[in-house]
Amino acid sequence: MEGNAVTSREEHQSEEEWDLEAMVASAEVVEEESRSEEQALTVQSQGMNYNKNWIFDSGCSDHMTGDKENLNVTTKYKGRRVVVTANNTKLPIAHVGNAIIASSSNAKDVQLEEVYHVPGIKKNLISITQLTAPGNYVVFGPKDVKVCKEVEIIGTPIMEGIKKNSMYVMSAESACIDSTRKNETADLWHARLGHVGYHKLKVMMKKSMLKGLPQLEECTKRFVKKIDRVSLKNLKKTQKKIYQNSEGRKGSEG
């Protein structure tokens, strides 16, 4: 049996060399685990039957399938719309109809309406936008996805976006709202504590020492710079006062 790469080395090596070898060995283990995980994902992907399974797609504007047999009550499409793929390829829509999807749970089978038959696409796609249009909710989790008629949200959302046309969009401005609010609260406590240093404030955050002080993993650069500017400004004022008091006359800074 092969020995461990770290523990089978000679004893005259320094502690630093041991640490480096341990880091390398750990990195190799992580790399091997990552490679195994990628292989598992590949196997799962290869085992999926794209002809029968339907994929939830948040970037798809309409339900669509490449197999006409997945539809019933089909009619020939007479509109001017085309399907534009990720590589800007334009595919014509041949038919439109309904699709019956068998439920994997005890619930009834689901009927998708206004499904496009697009010859050339290899997957059956469920449009999140089209699915939520009648008032349904689509909830994604770490291991599954659920479609519900009603949803009760418990807790504060981490991010929020809005629906624009056929897409769900989160702007950079809306993403910064929560961060800005937290920083405003942190700014307030920073002032209340006599412009305490950033590191002490961070310790208070981690230990939840003050009620109302937000838990921030890392303050933004704007907040850190603001603390530095305020502290430096106060330091200059203090130095100037000491200089004036000790000399008995007004002197210049610097």
Image (cartoon, helix red, strand yellow):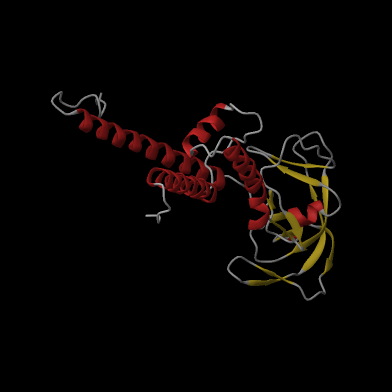
Residue 31 to residue 5: above or below: below
Residue at 63% x, 66% y: name it: 85
Q: Quick one: quadrant of the C terminus?
A: bottom left
Residue at 77% x, 40% y: name it: 103
Dividing the picture into quadrants, the one containing residue 83 is bottom right
Q: Quick one: quadrant of the N terminus?
A: top left
Near-viewer residue (13 or 3): 13
Furthest residue toward left = 12
- Looking at the image, residue 117 sits to the left or right of residue 249; the answer is right
> Is any atom of residue 191 visible in this view?
yes
Q: Point out residue 21 in the picture as x, y percentages from the top left corner.
A: 25, 33
- Looking at the image, residue 111 sits to the left or right of residue 91; the answer is right
Furthest residue toward front = 248
> Is any atom of residue 123 visible in this view?
no
Dividing the picture into quadrants, the one containing residue 5 is top left
Residue at 54% x, 38% y: name it: 217
Q: Point out residue 100 in the picture as x, y percentages from the top left corner.
A: 81, 50
Near-viewer residue (182 or 28): 182
Q: Point out residue 177 in the picture as x, y percentages from the top left corner.
A: 67, 50
Please give the count of numbered marks on the rendered protein: 0
Residue at 76% x, 73% y: name it: 81
Residue 178 to residue 32: above or below: below
Q: Point out residue 152 in the picture as x, y percentages from the top left corner.
A: 81, 37
Near-viewer residue (44 or 216): 216
- Looking at the image, residue 243 sits to the left or right of residue 7; the answer is right
- Looking at the image, residue 76 sits to the left or right of residue 216; the answer is right
Residue 30 to residue 54: above or below: above
